[in-house]
Image (spheres, rainbow, N blue to C red):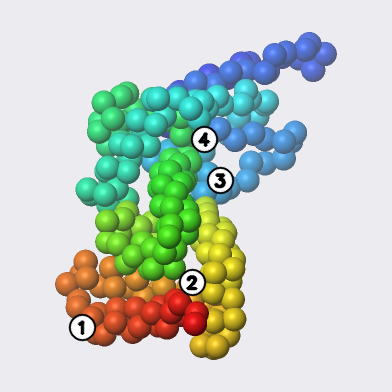
Amino acid sequence: MRGKTHFQEAAPAHTPTRPPSYDILMGGRVGVWAGADAPKAPDESADACMGGPAIYAPAMVQKRRVGAESSETRARIVEATEQVIRDEGYAAASSRRVALRAELPPSLVHYYFPTTDDLLLAVFRRGAEQSDAMIEAALTSADPVRALWRFFSDPSRNALAMEFVAMANHRKAIRAEIARHSEAMRDRQAQLMEQLLGDRLADHKVTAAGLSLLLAAVGRTLVMEADMGVASGHADARASVEALLDELLLPEK
């Protein structure tokens, strides 16, 4: 069993006892037996941060403390994790690797992020917040639809995005968070396009949600393929999207 776990000897039934504390600083997740029930198998999404089996104790345990969201140390860990993912891939983002990059002891990684999903979700959410700010800037610009198209076809954030797509194949929490965020932002984009373009969309047999997805899908495909050295059809695809936007955004007479 990994990690140190300190158990307090069970007292007689008539003697009140305080819940024992557990040293899990470098160990795995702590589970609890409910009465006489046998412990259940640990859920994959709650695996200890970068390894370590669940530790079960036949008694109450103290809830593990987690570092403050606003902590500079926490932000430093998230930044270091993103750097490791960008440079070496998400599989390389172990607690020790992240701690080394952040120049912090591994125990602090576990303190702020008890599980792997906690850490990876923090990195995704920070990136999502940055993307949201860029999208909002595009949507409130003088030429919002074209600005949104330029955002989707910008290659600067593709490397990290592709790592999270790969994570989503194996981690349910990441997949669910990506889906939640994508749905929310697409709804926001569609609402604005409906306000901006109105009847023009119907005249071209296009819906606001369809146009939003079209810009995102074509833009991201162009970026992903370009990163892999694929360019066939790219110029034609760009020209087709831009021709559609020219028609949709043609000033009314």
Q: Earlier in the sequence, mark 4 or mark 3?
A: 4
The CA span between labels 3 and 1 is 47 Å
Circle nearer the viewer, 2 or 3: 2
* Tally of numbered discs: 4
At a point 43% along the width and 43% down the height, the residue shown is 126
The CA span between labels 4 and 3 is 9 Å
Q: Earlier in the sequence, mark 3 or mark 1?
A: 3
Q: Secondary structure at mark 1?
A: loop
At a point 58% along the width and 85% down the height, the residue shown is 202
Q: Are marks 2 and 1 in contact (CB under 8 Å)?
A: no
Q: Secondary structure at mark 2?
A: helix
The numbered dot on residue 29 is 4
Q: Identify residue type, mark 2.
A: Ser
Q: Which residue is mark 2?
A: 212
Q: Identify residue type, mark 3.
A: Pro
The CA span between labels 2 and 3 is 40 Å
Q: Secondary structure at mark 3?
A: loop
Q: Which residue is mark 3?
A: 42
